[in-house]
Amino acid sequence: MKLNVDGLLVYFPYDYIYPEQFSYMLELKRALDAKGHCLLEMPSGTGKTTTLLSLIVAYMKAHPLDLTKLVYCSRTVPEIEKVMEELRKLMTYYEKELGMEQNILGLALSSRKNLCIHPSVSKEREGKVVDGRCYSLTASFVRARHAADDAVPICEFYEGFDAHGKEFPLPPGVYNLDDLKEYGQMKRWCPYFLARHTITHANIVVYSYHYLLDPKIAEVVSKEISKTSVVVFDEAHNIDNVCIDSMSVKITKRLLDKCSNSITILETTISNMKENDSKRLEKEYKRLVEGLRDATIARETDMALVNPVLPSEVLEEAVPGTIRTAEHFVAFLKRVVEYIKTRLRVQQVVQESPAGFLRDIHTKVCIDRKPLRFTAERLASLIRTLEISDLTDFSPLVTVSHFATLVSTYTKGFTIIIEPFEDRAPTVSNPILYFSCLDSSIAIKPVFNRFQTVVITSGTLSPLDMYPKILDFHPVIMTSFTMTLARPCILPMIVSKGNDQVAMSSRYETREDTAVIRNYGNLLVEVAAAVPDGIVCFFTSYLYLETIVSSWYDQGIIDQLQRHKLLFIETQDAAETSLALINYIKACDNGRGAVLLSVARGKVSEGIDFDHHLGRAVLMFGIPYVYTQSRILRARLEYLRDQFQIRENDFLTFDAMRHAAQCLGRCMRGKTDYGIMVLADKRFSRADKRSKLPKWIQEHLKDTLCNLSTEECVQICKRWLRQMAQPFSREDQLGISLLTLEQLQSEDMQKKIQLRAQGV
Amino acid sequence: MDDYQTCPKCKTTKYRNPAMVLMVNTCGHALCESCVELLFAKGSGACPECKCPLRRNNFRVQLFEDPAVDKEVDIRKRILKEFNKRQEDFPTLREYNDYLEEVETIIFNLVFDIDPTNTNKMIDNYKKENKDITQKNRNRQSQEEMELEELLEAEKAQQSEKANLYVNAELEEKKQKHKAREKLIDELMFSDADAKSIVASHVQATAALAKEQPKAAAQPGVVKSSKFSSGVQIGLRGQHTNSFLPIPKQEDLPLYRYTAPVFDYDGPPPPPIEKLGKLNYFANIRAANITERAGGYTEAMSCCRALQEALGGLFYSPQLMHKTAVLATNSSTQDTDDMETT
């Protein structure tokens, strides 16, 4: 249908629209008009993706100069594919309505592993190996060598792309990963490089967060994206963690040993080259003396080694004299690695600021800050000069060089923590150096500064005001939408005590208590007896899950449970978990019913949907706080407190509640779906926890559902399930939670939407 | 496992003797402590590996896994004591970099015993030429070092201050909560009022307190740093922050008060501008077109002015000095309007 959103003609590819989708468009349009950033929360299953796409595409068509590009960032490959499907639907609708080809090019980009069509390289399983082998076939010097000697293998697809692909742009249309591969096969062009080349002029680009947030990748892939773009981060409730991970480095003893090996390789290669072909080294040396930034860095194939973000004035400057020649640089690296090795030889935990580290490295091994800052850049240059084609061996050394560069560049917002052993196994010496980023705004700052509009959206972003604080930006619009429903299809409940009136809580003091564990077990058994099909349970940690399950065995709860449903457990092993998932789905599909025990923050809680019969109930056992004793977390909390005035408890609760909300949201994937959400912890009923749940859950969490015992909970469940089991058709929804064009345009509905816009 | 350190002379490993400590001397070859005692009982001797003469009191505990690095660091420290020129001592960055490379080459040569005679000559030459600069720089910290020191000190100060502040604040808050709760219980126990109203008033009081809290917490606020994390000053050089002129102080004057102006027309009062349309004055003049309106012009203005001009000074006579004062306010002109329409 064609909509009029605040004066903008929007083609919406469906015959019906949810009222909140329309409000979402209104807010988004306002943000685009204002050229500011926005933060929008809308429940999962209400069609966020299609709403976003249809509005932004319409806006691009109406204001082709103000908005040139949409960059859509998603988390996983399946999610990227989903977005491409929605986009395809939208474009076919456009074509049908307007009766002509649309001049819009949309494309998905993923790693080489997902896009490679080289017959042998694409067979590799690991992403890093694919990258390394691709590099060894496409690096500029390999191709130069091939020109001299035919025996050197190269990639025919890359050659094809290099020869022809650059002149002929991709015809307009929507290309997902498979389409790109097919197109590549047909033309004999490399789809990966084709996609990367096309990014600069495509209208819509869909890729993973890392291509924008990880400075090492962003510099190569997303550098040339124009300022007049809108960037969308979907499923962005964990965006601060992504930012932090992309700037943090972890160095273990084994990694350092590997570094030493790579350094020896470098040494021998240099001495070989000195004997045979000293010209190349001289050339590199001259270039470094001149202080020109390496021109070849722009060459797209030599991408594997780039340095993390640096202030640009550092890049303009010449490499300092201490590390100019290759031998000196290798000796320098050796000293750095040996120094870090001595630092790892500690007996107790050490925490240090980057400034302290720099001073110590200066006094111990006489390394100044400046050459340290150039380490990553210099190493990349050296590896290129030495024409080492197998990069996989060098990744440890590259990690160390990134660490050196980062530690000397940033003195604020980072901390160094050296742990001699893991907390769980204090007798086993396993020293690890964490260079941890504390400030999530560092990695995302360039994105906010660069692009005119950044949209952060997810099903669970509550409390909204935390995100601008921790990401340090000023949104123009910050809104949470609720779900309009024709029937009360979610039933959130807070169960705080068992039938014996013992309070249920995963608090540290009571979590080992047999009464609490038994109450949790009874709750699950009774819910399993009352609820049909699938039930998903979330625990706070793997450790807690294991202890609880083992005592349930002793208490006979597992036996009782298996009378009603089959039992599956998520483990830390990914393969095991996916097998359990497959069988869980099988058991639900054939009507046997199943219970899945999993962990908040685990694989199941992020990105796996339990729609309809796969998840009729979600049970959250305890509040999923992070492991609060972790030193990295402590350091981050302190930093947040000092820099952003966020109190420790506020942040911990925020983090726990967003994960809880994420888990609860797993069972609701649409308006025809229905599900029970049981929050089994006394502490959930406190105002500070309850108020941090997303609005669409809070709305249904009435006071009468807040302090229940197991028995009461089951009673309410039974009554509610009977109500939900009544036949439900589209006609029931029409006019309330689903609108046709006429209904949308009716005065009544417009008024309601207006009200809602003001109310939020 | 070959991970364990081994003494090259007696082959003891760290595994077999955890108390073993490896020592290195200037030549960069390791020996365990007991071997050192055995071989260098006299106070001096030859290195068992390279046969170069060593003194016992030059032995130090080996810091690094690779003894060669120990040796290199040793030499480096010695050389850098002499070669301590700073970037400020050179006119261009390029020259400084060349100098750095030269130093690096000297160290490299010494470590790997390449061309020792020439290298030593170079060092001696340098020493002679740059005696005074070396002497001067020894007591001076480089800019980078200074920056680091400053950062560290700032960190320390901030840490202790913040820690105190927050710990105190949190304690205070806890105390207050506890007090409030006790008070509530006391009241419930002893007062005769309705329990519900007591609880309600308590809830209100705590909410009010909670509102105040964040303000108090925000107070310790961050001091805006005057530096980027890379050490570059924000704005025009940190040193000059004090050199701005002080903001001129406002003088204390009595506040300005508005009084409506009084116009002396010396004639019958003209109709006010708002009433012109009603009184049908516009019938006889050209209406303003669109472009004029866009500029803010309306026909009322010129009409009003014309009327004022026409009526002003009509009563003027040097003998009578009749005056009519017209106030700018609407209410005062009300009665005169009625007269004219009739």
Image (cartoon, coloured by chain):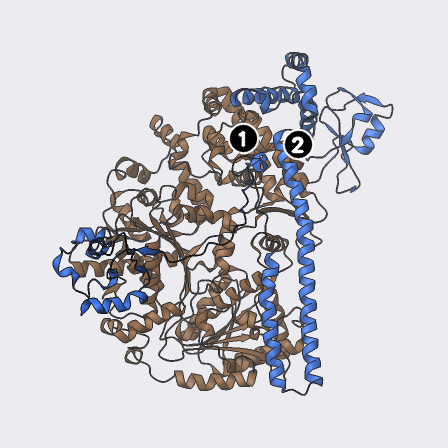
Do discs 2 and 1 share a chain?
yes
* Rendered image quadrant of residue A711: bottom right
Q: Which residue is mark 2?
A: A365
**Residue at (32, 66) in percent of width and height:** B332
Q: Where residue A102 sits: x, y (%)?
A: 20, 53
Q: Secondary structure at mark 1?
A: helix
- B269 over B156 or under it: above or below: below
Picture quarter with the C terminus of chain B: bottom left
**Residue at (44, 73) in percent of width and height:** A615
- Measure how far apart labels 2 and 1 are at the Cα level: 21 Å
Q: Chain of mark 2?
A: A
As drawn, the chain in brown is: A
In this view of the protein, which residue sits in the foreground, A299 or B52? A299
Give the crowd class for mark 1: few <14, some 14-19, many >=20 residues within 10 Å: many
Amino acid type assigned to the residue bearing label 1 in the image: Leu
Q: Is residue A698 left or right of residue B132?
A: left
* Rendered image quadrant of residue B196: bottom right
Q: Which residue is mark 1?
A: A266
- A93 over A551 or under it: above or below: above
Which of marks 1 and 2 precedes in the sequence? 1
Q: Where residue A749 sits: x, y (%)?
A: 29, 74
Q: Chain of mark 1?
A: A
In this view of the protein, which residue sits in the foreground, A336 or A592? A336
**Foreground: disc 2 or disc 1:** 2
